[in-house]
Image (cartoon, coloured by chain):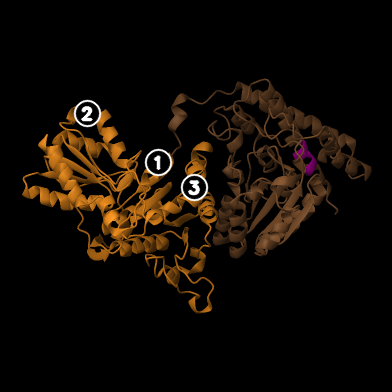
Chain colours: A brown, B orange
Amino acid sequence: MQLDKDTLLRLYETMVTIRVFETRVKEEFAKGRIPGFVHLYAGEEAVATGIIAHLSEDDKITSTHRGHGHCIAKGCDVNGMMAEIFGKATGLCKGKGGSMHIADVSKGMLGANGIVGGGPPLACGAALTAKVLGNGQVCVCFFGDGAAQEGTFHESLNLAAIWKLPVIFIAENNGFAESTPASYHCAIENIGDRAASYGIPGASVDGMDVFAVYEAAQEAINRARRGQGPSLLECKTYRFNGHFEGDQQLYKTDALQQSMMERDPITNFRLVTTQQGLLTSEELDAIDVRVKESIEHAVAFADQSPYPALSEVDTDVYVTA
Amino acid sequence: MAVQMQTKTVTVAEAINEAIRLEMRRNPRVILMGEDVAGGATLEHLEEDEAWGGVLGVTKGLVQEFGRERVRDTPLSEAGYMGAAVGAAATGLVPIAELMFCSFIGSCMDSMLNQASKIRYMFGGKATIPMVIRTIIGGGFRAAAQHSMVLYPMFAQIPGLKVVAPSNPADAKGLLTAALRDGNPVFVCEHLAMYQLKGEMPEGEYVVPIGVAAVTRSGKDVTIVGASMTARYALAAAEELAKEGIDAEVIDLRTISPLDENTILQSVAKTGRLIVADEANPVCGLATHIAGVVASKGFSSLRAPVGLVTPPHSPVPFSPVLEDAYLPNAEKIIVAARQVCAR
């Protein structure tokens, strides 16, 4: 499909921002400067990017424990994100959520979720709101191959189908649920085929190819906006890092890692767009420089920000009168 | 109260129905969802009509007034639709999600434990989850172990949730209305035995504040705290105890969480003796919690050990003789009060 130049540049910038952000988080984590756990999205950039490119700020997304990529693609501030991951008061969630619960409801990002399968019902709810209020919004629900085995996945697809909710379910199949291969834990090969069980449209696409993702997502999102109900889109992808940082990744062979890194979505995007004369190396390099600067700034911002006051321990538990 | 309100005699079920109806009229973002809350969805002859109006008819008539966009029957998918209620609340609706029996929390615990209760906190106060979970609690109907629990201690234990348990029609209307305006996830626990019990209910808009217990009988010899059905048993017990010269002060908690500790402590400071009667199981339960609060914050008031009237640590039995032995009642409260007052 033919995309205009602005869109191409946006796609590249989003993917690069995610990659540089995650690389930097990996480095900071290795230095012991990030508390808790981080789950990195490097390698999967094409999925978040290709899908969220179709959404407005008012549209909603629900995310997973591997949520930094979704957050960036949805337009969340990288300074606030980095500060949140560092546990600082200037974080998007005032340091109360951290990496696994990173959120910005004002940008339609309904949160990373520490519970596998926690997102799909929430996404049905966000779509229900859009339907009842008639505001034309949609909700995109990201989840992994692991979550596709949780009961909530099945209940959510059925519920969305019977109520024709404007929700698009995205199965980010990166081949592993933690250390367990999808070839073992999933009874079927293509999660996209499960759509048929719920009477909704389904597809499986190459999640390493942002163009393939972009095109498939457009169809699904338009369907939802037209009131034709939910779809299931499986994006076959791969995470370059472990399930969490610190994971020894014994379940990956060198051959697998190498072959997947050769399919790096960013490298291949650059190749395709420059070879076809759609973009120049200079344009792409300029983006690389700008992104690197903004992420360096984000780390400095997080570093220099204060931790939350101790009195914040039990604030924001309830809405008070 | 300065203003004299018009009241009418209704059942608890009717009071709940009215609270929902009035609030759905007042606030177009309130929706109702649950299994068979209308019943008969998509059947031609029941297009804007219902088959059941709730398993016990509590939500009868609502689909006729508000239609099936706002009164939604759900599949048997607690994890799906309770989670959807949370997502809808986070994005602008005020859902009433019915969890048919409180034990069914087993099927959707994540939506309450890890999502509804925590989203606001984890997002640094930048999200709100205004929703009501209406659920049936309590035994006495030989419905046996899986349909007879009182699980509010479990809900109350989770920070971020609120829990109320009315004992009469007026409080049922007032607390449910307050819950729908509270802006937080609130469990409204409706006792199975109470739905057909009658009482005076104010007409029109009526709100009972969450977090405020009611002293339903003033007394000087012993404080009896109850909630839901035990608040009613406590009053019945107090009537009998008066004939024996024991003047009981009765507190109807109305809200389980946040607990009105002050009302309890002030009463025990006056009477020096405390009975807590509760239908929830005692281990890590409400009665034991209240005893702990008074022991740590009101110890100097106590002239006798706290008397606890609760079921045993067991599931609810089926056979009528066993279930009656299991449940608290007015007689057990009377026995406990005599013991506590004899010391």
Label 3 amino acid? Met
Q: Main secondary structure of the magenta part?
A: helix
Distance CA(mark 1)–CA(mark 2): 30 Å
Q: Which residue is mark 1?
A: A320
Give the residue drawn at x 45%, y 74%.
B49
Residue situated in front as seen by the camera: B294 or A276: B294
x and y percentages locating residue A241 in the rendered image: 74, 33
Residue situated in front as seen by the camera: A10 or B105: B105
Q: Horizontal placement of A223 versus A284: left or right?
A: left
Question: Chain for mark 1?
Answer: A
Distance CA(mark 3)–CA(mark 2): 36 Å
Identify the magenta region: A11-16
Residue situated in front as seen by the camera: B182 or B163: B163
The answer, for residue A321, to whether it is visible in the render is no
Give the residue drawn at x 50%, y 55%.
B93
Could you say whether the residue bearing mark 2 is in a helix, strand or loop?
helix
Question: Chain for mark 3?
Answer: B
Q: Which residue is mark 2?
A: B299
Q: Which residue is mark 3?
A: B109
**Circle nearer the viewer, 1 or 3:** 3
